Image (cartoon, rainbow, N blue to C red):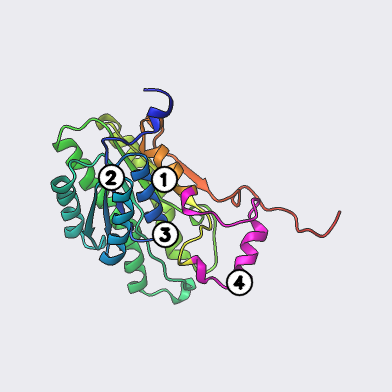
């Protein structure tokens, strides 16, 4: 396969968790625009229904599957219903994530469990369910995508538990890449920087300005910046790519521009 066909997802079925808004919504729509049918998973059915309407407008099928990924029984149901409603999934994007900003000394066990269950436990076991289904169906080609973070590589104030899960997910992708290569499954991660979503829209203006001053490209990213890479990592174009994490952060982790104070 060569040329633009290598980037096509025509005939593929994808599962996207956290698909009701933000990066998850952007990835789901990008997959559909590339030709995939998409199972949309999140807790908010109204938002999923809105995203599904956008996907059907692109001429693709969408399945709305209300899912709390912290409940592994619901994760198993997500795999089953995707098979029933769309066919066997060959792409899984683990996007659902949560955070609670607290200093380390103030983190409770309940905080820890809440964040770890959704950001790490869910993608770990949902991916395993996806892989088991893949093998049981005799499939030979599959892609898993995780969402890491800048906190996977650097320390930030009040983000210790979130950062721990996002550091771990980088290694999860590496482990899956090694173990699942014989089954034709590739696993990679994207580490977004600051992306414009409904959540970042409420950010304190002074903090938003700090971000723009420290990102070499001088702006927030948009969900399509993630979506385009997600399509590549879900397509045949990346069949020799696995166990990798890609920063999409406008150059933030590479370094920061000098302040504009003259020579």
Q: Are marks 2 and 1 in contact (CB under 8 Å)?
A: no
Q: Earlier in the sequence, mark 3 or mark 1?
A: 3
Q: Secondary structure at mark 4?
A: helix
Q: Position of residue 100 (x, y in %)?
A: 42, 71
Q: Which mark is residue 22?
A: 3
Is 226 rendered above or below residue 73? above
Foreground mark, 3 or 1?
A: 3
State the separation of the CA atoms marked 1 and 4. 30 Å
Q: Which mark is residue 60?
A: 2
| Quadrant in the picture for residue 116 | bottom left
Q: Secondary structure at mark 2?
A: loop
Which segment is the magenta one? 200-224
Q: Which mark is residue 205?
A: 4
Q: Earlier in the sequence, mark 2 or mark 4?
A: 2
User: Which quarter of the rendering shows the N terminus?
Assistant: top left
Identified at 33% across, 35% down, the residue is 178
Magenta-span inclusion, residue 213: yes
State the separation of the CA atoms marked 2 and 3. 20 Å
Q: Residues within 10 Å of mark 1 (few under 14, many from 20)?
A: many
Q: Main secondary structure of the magenta part?
A: helix
Is 35 rendered above or below residue 104? above
- Answer whether residue 243 is visible to the viewer in this image: no
Identify the residue position indicated by label 1 in the image: 189
Q: Are marks 4 and 3 in contact (CB under 8 Å)?
A: no
Magenta-span inclusion, residue 3: no
State the separation of the CA atoms marked 3 and 1. 17 Å
């Amino acid at each position: 396969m060569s040329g633009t066909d290598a980037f096509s997802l025509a005939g593929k079925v994808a599962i996207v968790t956290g698909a009701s808004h933000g990066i998850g919504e952007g990835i789901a729509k990008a997959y559909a625009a590339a030709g995939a049918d998409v199972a949309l998973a999140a807790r908010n059915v109204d938002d999923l229904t809105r995203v599904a309407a956008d996907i059907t407008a692109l001429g693709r099928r969408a399945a709305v599957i209300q899912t709390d990924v912290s409940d592994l029984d619901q994760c198993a149901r997500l795999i089953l219903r995707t098979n029933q409603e769309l066919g066997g999934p060959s792409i899984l994007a683990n996007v659902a994530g949560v955070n609670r900003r607290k200093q380390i000394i103030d983190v409770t066990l309940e905080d820890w469990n809440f964040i770890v269950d959704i950001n790490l436990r869910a993608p770990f076991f949902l991916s395993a369910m996806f892989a088991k289904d893949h093998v049981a169906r005799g499939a030979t080609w599959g892609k898993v995508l995780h969402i890491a973070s800048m906190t996977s590589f650097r320390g930030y104030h009040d983000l210790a538990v979130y950062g721990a899960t996002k550091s771990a997910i980088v290694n999860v992708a590496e482990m899956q890449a090694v173990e699942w290569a014989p089954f034709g499954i590739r696993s990679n991660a994207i580490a977004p920087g600051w992306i414009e979503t409904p959540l970042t829209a409420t950010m304190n203006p002074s903090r938003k300005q700090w971000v723009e001053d420290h990102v070499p490209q001088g702006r927030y990213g948009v969900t399509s910046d993630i979506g385009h890479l997600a399509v590549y990592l879900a397509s045949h174009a990346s069949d020799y790519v696995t166990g990798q994490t890609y920063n999409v952060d406008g150059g933030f982790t590479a370094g920061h521009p000098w302040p504009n104070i003259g020579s």
